[in-house]
Amino acid sequence: MTAPAILTSGLGREFHGKWAVRDLELAVQPGEIYGFLGQNGAGKTTTLRLLTGLLRPSCGTVHIAGLDPIQDGRAVKQQLGFVPDTPPLYDYLTGHQYIALVASLWGTPRAERDARSERLLDLLGLAEHAAALCKGYSHGTRKKIHIAAVLCTRPSVLLLDEPSSGLDPLSVRRLKDLLLEEATRGTTILLSTHGLELAEQICHRIGIIAGGRLRAEGTAAELRGSHDNRSLEDVFLSTTGAGG
Ligand SMILES: Nc1ncnc2c1ncn2[C@@H]1O[C@H](COP(=O)(O)OP(=O)(O)OP(=O)(O)O)[C@@H](O)[C@H]1O
Ligand SMILES: [Mg+2]
């Protein structure tokens, strides 16, 4: 087996004496799509921020492609793409300018950026929006422009926090196709989602987090199999203690 592209050991983070993430052991292989499920406040965003190096662990370790995101921040950022729940676009740039800025910061050659962004903008239905200033964008459009910008940089590890929230059904379909395509190219993807259907459709493995701890992990079929082949919704509700 190859070395995991995302690896955590004993990872924990506390805020004001309360653990948001605790004892997290994650190993995501190159080319794998790993879906993180959990109720509001379960610790998904905190985990993603720990993986990016935006947040320091209180304990434990993180390795992205074998590197520590705090110690080797620059090298990790070069390989990483991060789509936060609410992307911070610049109001007074157009979508085209924002994508060009992100691509240039990541050193993506201009010809590659142009070819990729044209295809991504077309696929995500953004062609007519990209010439307008970001400040007028809807929530979904902001998110899609940021996804397009990040994908233009061809990250080897892609972290997405609720990428489908706020997207219309066609955009969700296109996003799923894009993520599957990226994984086939070898990109490692970890995403958080409240979309159980999306998780079941595209994630090779799913982790369910509750109270900051990983409570269950496996393929959708394995998780359902361990719950009398009930639906992923039932598995989720019973694993998170929310019923079912
Ligand atoms: N900067 C912070 N300061 C204090 N507490 C925080 C901070 N960030 C997160 N927390 C707490 O950590 C816990 C986990 O929050 P987190 O945002 O990771 O949850 P989540 O699973 O992403 O939830 P959601 O589905 O609502 O996005 C929550 O109790 C939250 O209040
Ligand atoms: Mg969150």
Image (tube, rainbow, N blue to C red):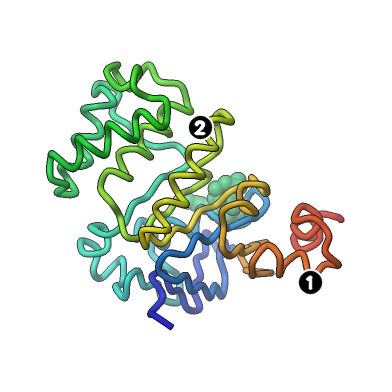
Which quadrant, please, contains the C terminus? bottom right
Mark count: 2
> Residue 147 or 58: which is nearer the viewer?
147
The amino acid type of the residue labelled 1 equals: Ser
23 with respect to 128 (left or right):
right
65 with respect to 93 (left or right):
right
Question: Residue at 13% across / 39% down in the picture?
Answer: 111
19 up-or-down from 131: above or below: below
Quarter of the figure with residue 213:
bottom right
Let me know if residue 211 appears in the view: no
Mark carried by residue 28: none
Which percent across, then down, holds residue 147? 38, 40
The amino acid type of the residue labelled 2 equals: Ser
Disc 1 marks which residue? 226
114 up-or-down from 106: above or below: above
Which percent across, then down, holds residue 18? 59, 63
Quarter of the figure with residue 127:
top left
Disc 2 marks which residue? 171
Q: CA distance from mark 1 to mark 2?
A: 33 Å
54 with respect to 228 (left or right):
left
Mark before the other along the chain sequence, 1 or 2: 2
94 up-or-down from 33: above or below: above
Question: Residue at 31% across / 34% down in the picture?
Answer: 119
> Residue 141 or 170: which is nearer the viewer?
170
Which percent across, then down, holds residue 173? 54, 37
Secondary structure under the numbered disc 2 in the rendered image: helix
Secondary structure under the numbered disc 1 in the rendered image: loop
Which percent across, then down, holds residue 102? 23, 40
